Image (cartoon, helix red, strand yellow):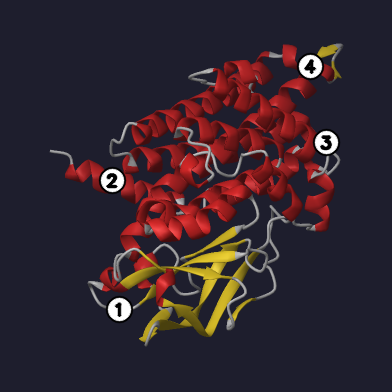
Amino acid sequence: MIAVTDREAADDTQAALFELAREVADAELAPYVDSAERAGTFPRATFRVLGRAGLLSLPYSEKYGGGGQPYQAYLQVVEELAGAWLAVGLGVSVHTLTCFPIATAGTDQQREDWLPAMLGGDQLGGYCLSEPGSGSDAAGLATRAVADGDEFVVDGVKAWTTHGGHADFYTLFARTSGDAAAPDRAKGISCFHVPAATPGVSAAPPEHKMGMRSSPTAQVRFESARVPAGQLVGEPGHGFRIALAALDAGRLGIAACATGVAQAALDYAVEYAKQRKQFGQPIIGFEGLQFMLADMATAVAASRALYLSAARRKDAGLPYGQQAAMAKLLATDTAMRVTTDAVQVLGGYGYVEDFPVERLMREAKVLQIVEGTNQIQRMVIGRELARTP
């Protein structure tokens, strides 16, 4: 991975934070990733370790147990963790996403009641937005929350939920008014905080995936689940704008994850090329391979620079949605290309499970899909360009 001393630290606290992230990655993640991926074992205890180390709470207020760190520092920690074990790095990003609505749109009482456990690692979240019939068209969701006295009765099915069946709570987006087919359907969506133990909430068996097998992804079902009105987050009907704001921030997390995966593949390919000899010399001495590695290194550096640039805009309170889409697009496409090239550098060895680059290649693919496909990112960027005077 990129050296700790090369990360962008604004002060000694951040430098120490990056060193801590490296130590955790080396001691708690790297030794276990291969066996857990092969067995499909979810590392729930690892998230408690991260919570105790303060690595689950970095971008949120210290008042509620957060780290009070700028987003650019948080993202570099996510990159470090993802490079060692993507399921963990992406899990941190998803958990941060699930905390976003309460942290930004919740009441003071909701923050005091829920955030400390969420940020400390005792509670792990899942984000329930997508459905079997609405993925990229998130405003077309059909799950309904019908008011009944001082409760809402929720019915529907959510799809592709990271940590589904293992999460302690779900950040749920459900329709409280309007019709999923109506032109103004986004206005009827509301956000809820739903503990996983709520009667009527259950998870389907996890999906069988190409990669990230240690990270459970499952449908979450809501069958006449009664949710107290006090667990509504934000104003009724304002859920979709909360979801989009959360996704802008979440896309930066995915960009950081992708950069970590690409850096890991690059590092392994470079070290292999230094050791592997053909025609009497290390293969890194051949110009064709040097050019491939040079292109890989340049693309990884560009991805990192773009997500950090977008993060600095977020930290400064500037609009950053377009930049987040650009960062997610570039970094995830780069991860797919770099991991594919890393397999090529290793030749036949790259195609077998004895070496990690085939796993990294399988993992990279999902990053082009989650939290808005890269085709959706291009739409976001294009629409912003069309609005530019």
Q: Quarter of the image containing the N terminus?
A: top right
Mark 1 / mark 4, whichever is N-terminal:
1
Kind of residue sitting beneath label 4: Lys
Kind of residue sitting beneath label 2: Gly
Mark 3 / mark 4, whichever is N-terminal:
4
Which mark's residue is nearer the viewer, 1 or 4?
A: 1
In the picture of the structure, the residue carrying the numbered disc 2 is 382
In contact (CB < 8 Å): disc 2 and disc 3: no
Mark 2 / mark 3, whichever is N-terminal:
3
In the picture of the structure, the residue carrying the numbered disc 4 is 274
Give the residue drawn at x 34%, y 65%. 239
What is the CA distance from the residue labelled 3 to the residue labelled 4?
A: 15 Å
In contact (CB < 8 Å): disc 1 and disc 3: no
Give the residue drawn at x 71%, y 37%. 84
Give the residue drawn at x 48%, y 36%. 68
Give how far across and how far down residue 345 sits, in percent.
Answer: 73, 29
> Tag 1, which secondary structure?
loop
In the picture of the structure, the residue carrying the numbered disc 3 is 349
Q: Quarter of the image containing the C terminus?
A: top left
